[in-house]
Image: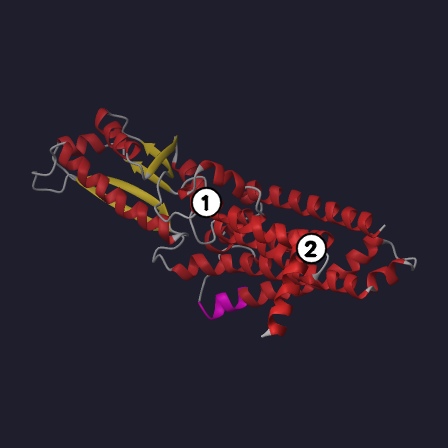
Amino acid sequence: MRNIRAIAFKEFIQVSRDRRTLMLLILMPMMQLMIYGYGINTDVKHLPTYVYDQDRTYLSRRLVDSFTQSDYFTVKVQATSMAQVYSALDKGLAQSALIIPPDFTGDLLKKKGAQVQMIIDGTDSTPATVALNSSQAIINAFMQNEGLIPVQVLPIDFRPRLWYNPDLKSTYFMLPGLIALVLQFLVPMITATAIVREKERGNIEQLLVTPIKPYQLILGKIIPYIFIGIFIATSIITTMHYLFVVPIHGSIVTLFFMTLVYLVVCLGIGLWASTVADNQQQASQLVMFLAMPSILLSGFIFPRESMPLWVKDISYLIPMTYFLQIVRGIILKGLGFFDLIGQVWPLLLMAVVVIVFSIRRFSKRMA
């Protein structure tokens, strides 16, 4: 018992002297509690919605107002063409679109069934289900408020459609995101611990006395991890496609190119962690500290539409936020490079900034 107390006392002293680890142990739980307490919310509301009102009468406007006044839909744009609606759904600018035909009011006044269509992006099953159920409830309430229920023919023939994932299979949504999750967790972890282990053994200092420059040393060490990351991504995509039968509608070349860009960002994160950490334990803690917000705030599990505005602003600083939209857009929607340019350029910028910053920091510390 005395030996156990002595070891425990020594461990407490060692942790108290390691200020970086101590700060992580104190601040990390509090920061995660604050962020996740606001960010984790499965009650999806304010879904971005496009409206294409071809009727433009008082009754069609009242129908649009019924959707606007609900907490579940936020009308972003009054579209002027179906092409604009399709483009918004493809690029993720809208989660749903309400289509009102030009003869909507006329059919209602003639006591004929008026057709109304709601197109819903089904890539994420949670907001898609909310949109499907709440839109039907809004239509039913609208018919009651307008006194349309007593007619013998159903006054509004409401036809919602689910795009990209019509059966709302969770595997279609989760498995493409698994590529981003695994790379975000494993690649920085193995990169940071490998470099810190070399520092602990003194191997890096021995290499630096040779003519090899610091940036050459770093690039030489991260290249193998690029191939490891590509192998991991390939195995996930292959298993997803052949075992779980998830269709890949887009270009494989574009998918692997963007995966390579995302890998560079992940490697830069691992390299940065290795310059901050003094040992492998600290490196692992730093990577975990960065990985958890990526999992919970990027849209991998919880829809970003349900998050407060300030939490969504934080999510724009997370590389996984952009890569999730890219990988799901390519696999589920068949989008091309230029269709995803709004997500591509922030990821490319992050890749350049994080690698250059990490290499300079590493060179400065080694010097």
Q: Is residue 56 depicted above or below 38 in this figure?
A: above
- Of labels 2 and 1, earlier in sequence is 2
Q: Which mark is residue 90?
A: 1
Q: Is residue 226 visible?
A: no
What count of labels does the image hold?
2
Residue 184 placement: quadrant: bottom right
Residue 117 placement: quadrant: top left
**Residue at 66% across, 59% down:** 13
Q: How many neighbours does mark 2 have within 10 angstroms: few (below 14), some (14-19), or many (20 or more)?
A: few
Residue 29 in percent (x, y) is at 52, 51
* Residue stretch in magenta: 237-244
Mark in the foreground, 2 or 1: 2
Q: CA distance from mark 2 to mark 1?
A: 53 Å
Residue 314 in percent (x, y) is at 53, 41
Mark 2: amino acid: Arg
Q: Is residue 183 depicted above or below 28 in this figure?
A: below
Secondary structure that dominates the magenta span: helix
Q: How many neighbours does mark 1 have within 10 angstroms: few (below 14), some (14-19), or many (20 or more)?
A: many
Q: Which residue position is annotated with label 2? A: 17
Q: Tell me which colouring the rendered structure shows.
A: secondary structure
